[in-house]
Image: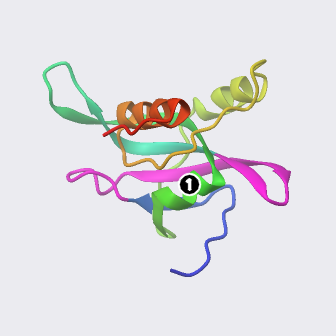
Amino acid sequence: MPAMTFKAGQCWRYAAPEGFENSRILIGAIASFSQDRSILCCAVTAAPERQQDGSLAPVAIPFLAFSEEAFRATVTSRDDDCLASLPDEFAAALDAWQNDPEGLACFTVPFDGRLDLLIARQMAAIVGTDAA
């Protein structure tokens, strides 16, 4: 795969679950701390969310922050024809993240469309175990 260069405003495909292949990750901002460390602040369109009845329904995830390494492991190709735009909630979530007194936390594990699994994988990575 050719080298991937990331910029705010880009739209990316990822290995979304079956039935959610139109879900996209939008880069809203990039926080750079040095030449070798960046955090990509993103939103996700049409991501699957488990409903109370067990079914999956598409939802927007207004804000997710990823290490650049986790983002690279997540995305498969850029979608230059994407018409999606950042959710209205993105700006407020970005502001809250930037002003978080605990620091600029980000996910360091890949995303496959399910927020609950992403959180479980991140927690497993923190404690040094393997999450399914």
* Nearer to us in this view, 63 or 131: 131
Q: Is 95 displayed left or right of 128 in the figure?
A: right
At label 1, the amino acid type is Phe
**Residue 120 on image: x %, y %:** 40, 31
Q: Is 56 displayed left or right of 96 in the figure?
A: left
Q: How many marks on residues?
A: 1
- On screen, 98 above or below 68? above
Q: Please, which residue is most extreme toward the front here? A: 128
| Residue picked out by circle 1 | 71
Residue at 19% over, 18% down: 52
* Nearer to us in this view, 114 or 86: 114
Residue at 29% over, 57% down: 21
Q: Which residues fall within the magenta stretch? A: 15-40
Pointer 1 local density, CA inside 10 Å: few below 14, some 14–19, many at least 20: many
Q: Quick check: is 52 in the magenta stretch?
A: no
Question: How was the colour assigned to the protein in this rendering?
Answer: rainbow
- On screen, 25 above or below 64? below
Q: Quick check: is 26 in the magenta stretch?
A: yes
**Residue 1 on image: x %, y %:** 50, 80
* Nearer to us in this view, 17 or 35: 35
Q: Is 8 displayed left or right of 63 in the figure?
A: right
Residue at 44% over, 47% down: 111
* Nearer to us in this view, 80 or 56: 56
**Residue 115 on image: x %, y %:** 40, 34
**Is residue 82 visible from the viewing direction of this image?**
no
Residue at 67% over, 69% down: 5
**Is residue 12 visible from the viewing direction of this image?**
yes
